[in-house]
Image: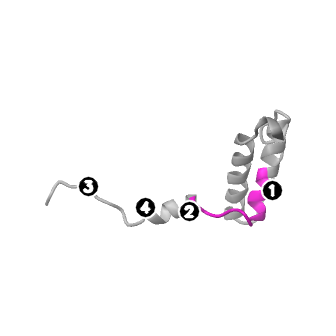
Amino acid sequence: MTGGTVRLAASPAAQDQHDQDYSKNKNYQLGMRDGRDDSAHNRDHSRKRNFKKDQDQKDYEVGYQAGHQSNSPDHK
């Protein structure tokens, strides 16, 4: 055995999930709008939305976080 670094084959696939194109994802866009609105009104996750699929919920949450964090003065 040699003392080397073990590389996982799944790493690139995991990275692809983080680089997903959300431009046409309606749940992401909804989350983005809600996040921006909450940020503009100094609220934290004021709307609780329930989705039938876990992936839809995750897409919404990613959009919400992006919208809430990306609020700049021109959004107020």
Q: In this picture, is 31 found above or below 40? A: below
Q: Position of residue 67 (x, y in %)?
A: 74, 46
Which residue in the protein does label 3 denote? 5
Residue located 70% across and 41% down the image: 69
Q: CA distance from mark 1 to mark 3?
A: 42 Å
User: Of callouts 3 and 2, which one flags the residue occurring earlier in the amino acid sequence?
Assistant: 3
Q: In the image, 11: left or right of 20?
A: left
Q: From which residue to which does the magenta span run?
A: 19-32
Q: Which mark is residue 17?
A: 2
Q: Which mark is residue 30?
A: 1
User: Of callouts 2 and 4, which one flags the residue occurring earlier in the amino acid sequence?
Assistant: 4
In the image, is residue 28 part of the stretch drawn in magenta? yes
Report crowding for label 2: few under 14, some 14 to 19, many 20 or more residues within 10 A (C-alpha): few
Q: Quadrant of residue 45?
A: top right
Q: CA distance from mark 4 to mark 3?
A: 14 Å
Which residue in the protein does label 4 denote? 11
Residue located 82% across and 33% down the image: 42
In the image, is residue 69 part of the stretch drawn in magenta? no
Q: Secondary structure at mark 1?
A: helix
